[in-house]
Amino acid sequence: MTTDVRHYTIAEYMSLPDDGRHYELVRGELVEMPGPSGRHGRIITKLSRYLDVYLDSKSIGQVFSGSAFVLDSANNTARIPDVAFVKAEKLVGINYDEALPFPPDLAIEVLSPSDIWSEVVEKVRQYLAVGVELVWVVDPFDKNIYLYYPDQSKKTLYSGDELDGENVIPGFNLTAKLLFD
């Protein structure tokens, strides 16, 4: 739901005062995001923890949760994936006090009861169009994980399947069921 018809730059978006609401910036317009449910937050926490523990022993990149990523600076679009991974070479010299000036390498969205599937798919398309290498959409209701790729292919994982980082986070493996327990 769009909450404001004024158009913002990314700099203005990043300097908004904290009013207790969560926003993304889509083509210059603020889009209010609903607050996450307990189930949603729990899955984000688990994903972040599993990824962070794996990455602690590697020097390949970092995991982020709740961070803004600039997807299109010319059109003032910044999204906040629920969880994201960025390869180490992209992080050299960045200012962590600003929106990350590039898209993540892996974007993860966890569905909420208020999500509209067409809007989730649009967000996935935006991620892939700007160079995100892999998108995971975690569905806690059906206990599936949908994987989307830049070549427009997709794959569905079920609760007992193994989720892996493929070529984005080599060696990372996780049984999908662990996210839903």
Image: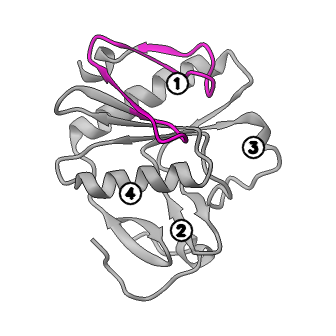
Instruction: Give the magenta part as a residue range.
Output: 147-174
Q: CA distance from mark 4 to mark 3?
A: 27 Å
The residue under label 2 is 77
Q: Are the residues flagged by discs 1 and 4 in contact, CB closer than 8 Å?
A: no
User: Where is residue 162 drawn, in percent x and y?
Assistant: 40, 12
The residue under label 1 is 51
Q: Residue furthest right?
A: 93
| Residue 75 located within the stretch drawn in magenta | no
Q: CA distance from mark 3 to mark 2?
A: 20 Å
Q: Between residues 26 and 35, which one lies in front from this camera angle?
A: 26
Q: CA distance from mark 4 to mark 2?
A: 13 Å
How many residues crowd mark 3 within 10 Å: few (<14), some (14–19), many (20+)? some
Say which of marks 2 and 1 sits in front: 2
Q: In which image quadrant can residue 179 be found? A: top left
Q: Is residue 46 above or below residue 33?
A: above
Say which of marks 3 and 2 sits in front: 2
Number of marks: 4
Q: Earlier in the sequence, mark 2 or mark 1?
A: 1
For the residue labelled by badge 2, is the local secondary structure a helix, a strand or a loop? strand
Image point 76% across, 52% down: which residue?
A: 94
Q: Name the amino acid, label 2.
A: Thr
The residue under label 3 is 91
Q: Earlier in the sequence, mark 3 or mark 2?
A: 2
Image quarter where the C terminus lies is top left
Image point 53% across, 74% down: which residue?
A: 13
Q: Name the amino acid, label 3.
A: Leu
For the residue labelled by badge 4, is the local secondary structure a helix, a strand or a loop? helix
User: Where is residue 4 drawn, in percent x and y?
Assistant: 35, 83
The residue under label 4 is 122
User: Where is residue 110 drawn, in percent x and y?
Assistant: 33, 40
